[in-house]
Image (cartoon, rainbow, N blue to C red):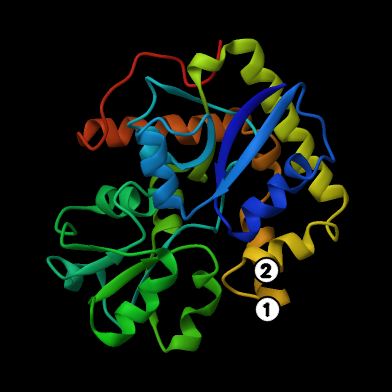
Amino acid sequence: MQQLTLGYSPCPNDTFIFYGLIHGQVSCHGVSLEERLEDVETLNKLALAGELDLTKISYHALGHLREEYCLLRSGGALGRGCGPLVVAPQAMNMEQLRGKRIAIPGQLTTANLLLQLYGAGYENLLILPFHEIMTAVCSGKADAGVIIHESRFTYQQQGLQSVLDLGQWWEEDSGCPIPLGGILAKRSLGTERIKQIDAALRASVEYAFANPRQPQSYIKQHAQELEDEVVRNHIKLYVNDFSIDLGDEGIKAVETLFARAEARNIIPTCKLPLFAE
């Protein structure tokens, strides 16, 4: 039995997706998985240090990791209407935020990548765990914040205003769905093993869709927001057909994101294939 480390976030979409795999409901073909639940920016840093065999990752971080890791086709967060939101204490536009302090959930998050791709002048950043961003904006610690995950559904309760839906901007500007996070495997695991893991991950996603009630206690054990409606909306938003398989449309979205980031010198170029071959 080969033991591998697997990192993912405590957010409902990830605990929903990985439930079957972690709780023995699907076979992982001779692999024993040691899970590590961390916020997305911590996972990004662990992957940069090469400390995880398999991990959920921000696509921004993958742009810096393509030499060591390849992308899996299943398990990721990619879709429409699910992008990060820029929020502020009062109504304003993005032009008014140039040079202002903006709280983000991590330097290597896709949320920050989309903010930087939107335009110049948004480099005055305050890096915080995603669940602390709204508090920072409300308290005046930051002029605005880029929120992700459950915060999309609760920011109005905090009296905050939406400045820009970065996902909507990306979709309209690129014509592609939004690549938020993917699942990576170390290339050193070898093509055969990586494809076996990808198949097991797909089976885990399909299991969760077929048995949506089973993961509920596991999801609530780790969720920041415990209201049933918030959890259901979160999963509905971030887990979809692209989570089963990226498909041609999903792959095009990832390639478009990387091409734009490379053109802006935000990520290095890489000649290796995106997937294990």
Neighbours of disc 2 within 10 Å: few (<14), some (14-19), many (20+): many
Vertical position of residue 245 compared to residue 155: above or below: above
The location of residue 140, given as percent across then percent down, is 24, 84
Expressed as whole percent of the image width and height from the top left, the position of residue 89 reads 31, 85
Question: Residue at horizontal 16%, vertical 53%?
Answer: 120
Q: Of helix, strand and loop, which one carries label 1?
A: loop
Q: Give the Cα distance between marks 2 and 1.
A: 6 Å
Looking at the image, residue 251 lies above or below residue 270? below
Residue ID at (73%, 60%): 218
The one of 95 and 186 positioned closer to us in this rendering: 186
- For the point 49% across and 34% down, which residue is it? 52
Residue type for callout 2:
Val
Depth check, front residue: 258 or 134: 134
Is residue 25 shown left or right of residue 233?
A: right
Compared with 107, 150 (above or below) is: below
Can residue 241 be seen in this snapshot?
yes
Which label is found at residue 227?
A: 1
* Relative to 242, residue 270 above or below: above
Measuring from the top left, give residue 153's x and y in whole percent.
55, 74
Q: In the rendered view, does 204 fall on the left or right side of 113?
A: right
Query: Could you say which quadrant of the image residue 54 lies in?
Result: top right
Q: Which mark is residue 231?
A: 2
Q: Which residue occupies 29% across, 51% down?
A: 107
Q: Is residue 43 left or right of residue 21?
A: left
Mark 1 burial class by Cα count in 10 Å: few <14, some 14-19, many 20+:
few
Callout 2 secondary element: helix
